[in-house]
Amino acid sequence: MTIAENIQQIEAKLGDTTRLIAVTKTKPIEMLMEAYQAGFKRYGENKVQEMVEKYETMPKDIDWHLIGHLQTNKVKYMAHFVGMIHSVDSLKLLQEINKQAAKHNRTIDCLLQIYIAQEETKFGLSAAEAIELLSSDEVATMKNIRIVGLMGMASNTDNHDQVCQEFRNLKQLFDELKTSSPLHSNITMTELSMGMSSDYLMAAQEGSTLVRVGSAIFGSR
Ligand SMILES: *Cc1c(COP(=O)(O)O)cnc(C)c1O
């Protein structure tokens, strides 16, 4: 199957409420252009430098999502174009995104990355840390960011029950935050980013609004 066919097939399986992000890390521009020429415009990269290089070469109407761990000193390289940052895990990072976005007169959509896996190596905030961040007075003053939801990465395991439970835990936190009041005016809980190649269907069933799919579209890395 071609890249365009893979995308079409995955999108057909996702409901109307779940959107696909094509994860293009390590993949060459030619592959992205194949998807772009088929009309697909939402891409995810996990490294800033690689995303910047692709941004500079590709057409400018692409919606770029930064999905990997982000260091504060890298924000400036992408603040002029990035559409959404999925991996916000500290107030300090949020401050820098706000500052750099302001320089370009932009508002950048952000997700808080929540730690849901059992593995030690994953980045992210605990539920309590996320709640603390969301309720901080300082966030309320940030005019150039919007916190639009949560992102999580499930454990890297074949145990479907475990992955399912981790997605449910994240969805539950998402729902709690959505109904908890009052959120600052620059916070809305509308996007839930969870699910990858191996589990995007399950994630969609559990309430994901954004799935991040790489190898199922472009082949293994
Ligand atoms: C690489 C990556 C994905 C996509 O992984 P696949 O298994 O290839 O679908 C999703 N999310 C993040 C954060 C990634 O780094």
Image: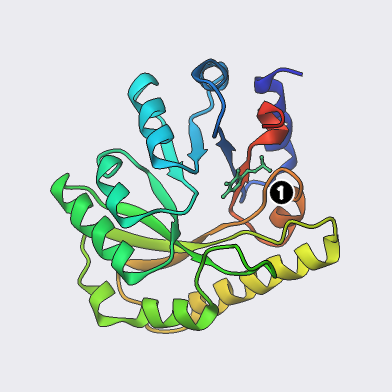
Q: Is mark 1 within 8 Å of ligand 1?
A: yes
Using the rendered image of the protein, determine whether residue 61 is visible from the camera's viewpoint. no
Identified at 38% across, 69% down, the residue is: 90
Nearer to the camera, 178 or 77: 77
Residue 162 in the image, given as x and y percentages of width and height: 80, 67
Q: Which residue is mark 1?
A: 200
Identified at 50% across, 77% down, the residue is: 177
Tell me: residue 159, above or below residue 24.
below
Q: Seen in the image, is 65 located left or right of residue 61?
A: right
Using the rendered image of the protein, determine whether residue 56 is visible from the camera's viewpoint. yes
The quadrant of the picture showing ligand 1 is top right
Tell me: residue 142, above or below residue 30.
below
Nearer to the camera, 55 or 9: 55
Assign the N terminus to one quadrant of the image: top right
Tell me: residue 126, above or below residue 161.
below
Identified at 75% across, 40% down, the residue is: 13
Which three-letter amino acid code belongs to the residue tagged 1?
Tyr
Identified at 31% across, 56% down, the residue is: 72
Q: Seen in the image, is 179 located left or right of residue 94?
A: right
